[in-house]
């Protein structure tokens, strides 16, 4: 390859726009226009959560290591404590965001966090 060809190739490469390597984003709405988020169960057991859609709570079971697309604006997680009391936590969620559910060993309860 001669020097002119090399210089031409280098010039072409330098003029190309940089590639964007973004992670795939969650869709913000489903086909009916309802907001959608992705929830991942990072636990080793199935977890049942509740989602609030149009003011109504709906139960959803998510198998371990699996994702679920959900509509709604809140998630409710319940944990039965060792003394038998039921602790329920309501988390607001945003359309198009990814979240993960996990067992919080320090708090001894189910927890949710933004997924990066």
Image (cartoon, rainbow, N blue to C red):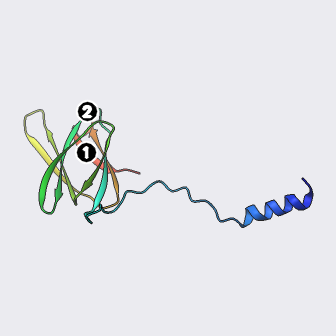
Please state which of residues 116 and 18 is positioned toward the viewer in this rendering: 18
Name of the residue lying farthest toward the front:
31
Q: Quadrant of residue 16?
A: bottom right
8 displayed left or right of 2? left
Q: Position of residue 37 (x, y in %)?
A: 30, 56
Q: Quadrant of residue 71?
A: bottom left
- The residue that appears at 41% across and 51% down in the rendered structure is 116
Other-residue count near label 1 (Cα within 10 Å), few / some / many at <14 / 14–19 / ≥20: some
Q: Marks 2 and 1: CB-CB under 8 Å?
A: no
Q: Position of residue 113 (x, y in %)?
A: 31, 50
Q: Is residue 58 above or below residue 64?
A: below
Other-residue count near label 2 (Cα within 10 Å), few / some / many at <14 / 14–19 / ≥20: few
Q: Is residue 12 above or below residue 91?
A: below
Q: Position of residue 65 (x, y in %)?
A: 33, 37
Which label sits in the foreground, 2 or 1? 2
- The residue that appears at 34% across and 57% down in the rendered structure is 97
Q: Which residue is mark 2?
A: 45
Q: Position of residue 95 (x, y in %)?
A: 30, 61
Q: Is residue 92 above or below residue 87?
A: below
Name of the residue lying farthest toward the right:
2
Q: Which residue is mark 1?
A: 111
Mark 2 vs mark 1: which is more N-terminal?
2
Asked which secondary structure carries label 1, the reply is: strand
């Amino acid at each position: 390859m001669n020097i002119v060809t090399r210089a031409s190739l280098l010039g072409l490469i330098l003029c190309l726009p940089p590639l964007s390597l973004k992670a795939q984003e969650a869709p913000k709405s489903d086909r009916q226009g309802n907001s959608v988020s992705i929830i991942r169960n990072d636990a080793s057991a199935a977890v049942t959560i509740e989602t609030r859609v149009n003011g109504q709570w709906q139960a959803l079971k998510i198998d371990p290591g699996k994702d679920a697309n959900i509509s709604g604006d809140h998630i409710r997680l319940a944990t039965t404590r060792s003394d038998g009391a039921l602790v329920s936590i309501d988390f607001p969620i945003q359309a198009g965001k990814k979240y993960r559910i996990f067992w919080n060993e320090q708090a001894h309860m189910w927890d949710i966090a933004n997924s990066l």
